Amino acid sequence: MYIEKVNSPADLKNMPVDEFEGLSVELRQTLLKKLSEHGGHIGPNLGMVEATIALHYVFNSPVDKMVFDISHQSYVHKMLTGRKEAFIYPEKYDEVSGYSEPSESEHDFFVIGHTSTSVSLATGLAKARDLKGDHENIIAIIGDGSLSGGEAYEGLNNAAVLDSNIIIIVNDNQMSIAENHGGLYKNLQELRETEGKAECNFFKAMGLDYMYVAQGNDVKALIEAFSKVKDIDHPVVVHINTVKGKGFRPAEENKEKFHAGGPFDLVTGKSKFDASRVENYGDLTAEYLLAKMKQDKTVVAITAGTPTVFGFTADKRMLAGKQFVDVGIAEEHAVAMASAIANNGGKPVFGVLGTFIQRAYDQLSQDLCINNNPALLLVFWSSISSMNDVTHLGVFDIPFMCNIPNLVYLAPTTKEEYFAMLEWGIKQTSHPVAIRVPFNGVVSTGEKVEEDFGLLNRYKVAKKGSQVAVLGLGTFYQLGEKVVEALKAEAGIDATLINPRYITGTDAEVLDELKKDHTCVITLEDGVLDGGFGEKIARYYGPSDMKVLNFGMEKKFVDRFSVDELLKESHLTVPQIVEDVLKIID
Amino acid sequence: MYIEKVNSPADLKNMPVDEFEGLSVELRQTLLKKLSEHGGHIGPNLGMVEATIALHYVFNSPVDKMVFDISHQSYVHKMLTGRKEAFIYPEKYDEVSGYSEPSESEHDFFVIGHTSTSVSLATGLAKARDLKGDHENIIAIIGDGSLSGGEAYEGLNNAAVLDSNIIIIVNDNQMSIAENHGGLYKNLQELRETEGKAECNFFKAMGLDYMYVAQGNDVKALIEAFSKVKDIDHPVVVHINTVKGKGFRPAEENKEKFHAGGPFDLVTGKSKFDASRVENYGDLTAEYLLAKMKQDKTVVAITAGTPTVFGFTADKRMLAGKQFVDVGIAEEHAVAMASAIANNGGKPVFGVLGTFIQRAYDQLSQDLCINNNPALLLVFWSSISSMNDVTHLGVFDIPFMCNIPNLVYLAPTTKEEYFAMLEWGIKQTSHPVAIRVPFNGVVSTGEKVEEDFGLLNRYKVAKKGSQVAVLGLGTFYQLGEKVVEALKAEAGIDATLINPRYITGTDAEVLDELKKDHTCVITLEDGVLDGGFGEKIARYYGPSDMKVLNFGMEKKFVDRFSVDELLKESHLTVPQIVEDVLKIID
């Protein structure tokens, strides 16, 4: 056993290099055992075992500083820097996060979870080093997939003129989450095929020195390469050719499926949850869009590197053909392109996670909304109950999207309403439209929903009562139903229930009408309160006698939280809401 | 006279090519006359005269579609597409905007004012064309400076795999607004020096076909080149070498000064306003920072291609040396780098316009605020009274910044307060801090301001009164003073005046105290209301009896508006505010 000897990078440096192969085997076994039981990022980490050993053998972390892009390949780094127990012992699995995390270790410098940032961050570390007159090595590790994001390019362009030490390890495993897309990848292929000797070289064209390592899973070759660039006095790229999923056949053979995921069988690779698959909006959306595409050749689905978010698995991408575009991890381009497709008479549908659409704020505002082009965005996984990593929260989309003029941001409450909005969003030609796809499971009422949402900002009064009105937005509409029931049961209040439907506007008619026989309006939204929907209602009623209570999450970053606890802390349980309301109207 | 013959691109096509040199001379004279009297973008347009003639001679606009990046070089295009009168007749100067504008002409496809978008937009136009089975040429025009932005790179990466016609004209005038920075520019230089023959070629590395035109101000050479790529069946870059400021010696000799500006003398090039220069926060900030840099070698000022925004003219950049970094038009990189500099013990100060910092929303959230690094951002020109082009509004920064957790966004009201905040922002090591630099002239009171803003979210009660409280945020504090005076004079109300100072938090103590003897709180903010500061106050008081009135601008895109009219429309004049308040408290 080698793994037990390594409690810090210093222990690695005292090991004979010949033992690293054995150590690699053990690290992989440990990774696979945890990931098969616990889930996580699989392929990227399996591919980086040898490179991470070599990095820590050659460099002197934490004096030398390593920045792992998006952190998907940082597990081995965690295991070698004093955190291996969280990979070995099931009861400790949750003691480390899935991302780079300074609070866990002095070997981590940033919390990182979005793509394409490592070169920029490393450039800043290097700049500070130079200003202080220090001399450590600064190392950015970035995957080929992450190179499709604009921030990576901006980083490379600036790293190149740093005029001092910065080492950029390009971990080329020939994959993004799905396959790579873009002109750059032809050049990477050419570089691999020529063992780095092709004259036309993207990295050299960016002004960077360059070195190629053909055997990116050979620890000795990597040690040799890294030793050559250690303490280098100028920016250099070390392009290493690795195998995603290395050492686990199912992952080597199905790289997309094994990029990341939940628990799986260690022998067959089969997901432990495959059998129990439930109806979900991703699959439903892809099926709906594929049918649309057949009817209308100008319908085109767009993804920024995460096609399965809206159900476009490899087989469905194949079916869609030219009507499906993966732009790489390039949300900015995706939004601008969608706007232009709509401008020229096409029908673009960009499916994206709430946490990632924020990467294109300027493009939403400038390329899309100022131009008022009728592109459609489907925003998935926006909810307090969505991913619970601090870098992947789904709670900020309302504040950053709903204050952009011209955008129509819709919040469906049921399956029927979602598809009616989707239908309208594709058909209409007047507005940029986004739909906040529900995240609380597929709720179906069977009720037919009207299909024209072109009369903007009309709230739907689902149940007319008096005294208290409940505005249940999107995924929190069902919570609103329960609050209304509880108010009746507990206080005999016959509350009004409203489905606002439009996040981006207030319905003056409905809100004014409430003034007649209501004293209190409450808003429920599945996200942060600051800058959100409820505050608009509070502003609307500000000069009036109406009492307003906004329910949602306070503005803060939370990490690996319990959803139930966070909901409770936010007063988002039915009893708490009822209690708060009764306090106000007494 | 040639110019009078050209009322549309069709007229150009009927002219003998030999007349184009004469036409170029006239177009330049016309441009210079208008720009010297009216101001605007000078250098970029002077350099593009011949290329624009050639584009419209060779291609068939508007069937063939041209997209001008950032629009700084689109004036000649406007002159050749039926809009020349707005360049010839002073009384019509304001009839066309300074940007690409579909409402003016069928030859413009997008409103464009932010950098690096043209390739992405053109890719979308091309994709829609292909889906529809059409066959027109799609042409993106992009300057070398704009190539430093990540969206341009994402666009190139995707244009390359379009597998159909797209023509990207790279207008290389060897300048951004100031000089270019970044590794890419060495490659562009090599390409110019080898007349496009260098083996290592950025565009080819991105998978694009490539052609070089050495004489980018020779209309015949350009016509020849454009004719070769017309109707091409794959993506191609035409790299044209042009002279920024071509034909006007002062502009050729001082390219940065003549990128854009106000009226100037046609003979000497001298600005007509040089003599009357008034004290401004840009110059004051640069002087302050230069002094700081001398005391502390870890202080570093950062710009994303707009150094003079915070006073860093060429001479001051020289003085700052390694302590000034221009990252190109790459706000994403700038924010990430600033975060990392702060993380490694440096003291970064990123000076940026409010309209451009939105290009880095994700980096503000992820790279900076989740990591809670003590970088300092100075946000300039955020105000309703700032630039009045729809693409450059300074009214959205509060909604998109103040709802990001951990950020401390400060709103100084005077010169003394600004410099106290600046001093604290650099010194402190606990928070990411941004300062909304006042835009209403330099207001100095002479009063010394306390220097520790580390006790967050403490509003300053400037004058204690009763009944009505006025929260005058940042640049609207002086408006608040006037409102308080008017309330006294007109209604005998002794109103309270509060300087909130912190945009990103509410001061419960001060707000609760007001409940005792106030019935109405009004907020004044110099930006849009939606998602802004006032709504947080409305939410705070929502469950109470306090009446709240939020004053600011409604959420909408406005273009070339009269500031006075917009203020009036927004009820932001003193009499309107007083009237609205009196209505509420009656």
Image (spheres, coloured by chain):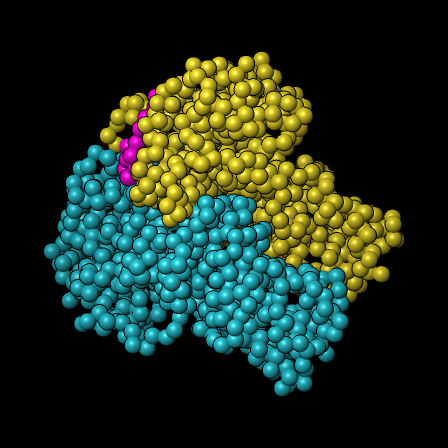
Chain colours: A yellow, B cyan
B198 w.r.t. A19: above or below: below
Which residue does the image show at 73% across and 73% down from the upper left?
B519
Count of numbered circles in the view: 0
Tell me the residue at 52%/37% (across/down).
A106
- Please identify the quadrant where the C terminus of chain A is shown: bottom right
- Residue A124 image point, x, y percent: 41, 45
Name the one closer to the observer, A207 or B101. A207
Across and down, in percent, residue B355 comes to: 44, 58
The residue that appears at 51% across and 48% down in the rendered structure is B373
On the picture, is B148 further left or further right than A493?
A: left
| Range shown magenta | A201-214
Instruction: Determine which quarter of the picture holds residue B501.
Output: bottom right
Q: Is residue A424 above or below residue B285?
A: above
The spot of residue A297 in percent (x, y) is: 45, 36
Q: Position of residue A77 (x, y in %)?
A: 50, 28
Nearest the viewer among A260 and B375 is B375
* Magenta stretch encompasses residue A210: yes
Name the foreground residue: B141 vs B575: B575
Q: Is residue B69 magenta?
A: no
- Decide which of A373, B348 is in the foreground and name it: B348
Residue found at x 25% / y 43%: B186
Residue A373 shows in the view: no
Q: The N terminus of chain A is located in which quarter?
A: top right
Q: Is residue B406 something that shows in the picture? A: yes
| Above-or-below relation of B359 to A29 | below
Please indicate whether residue B194 sits to the left or right of residue A223 in the image. left
Describe residue A222's horizontal placement relative to residue A521 as left or right: left
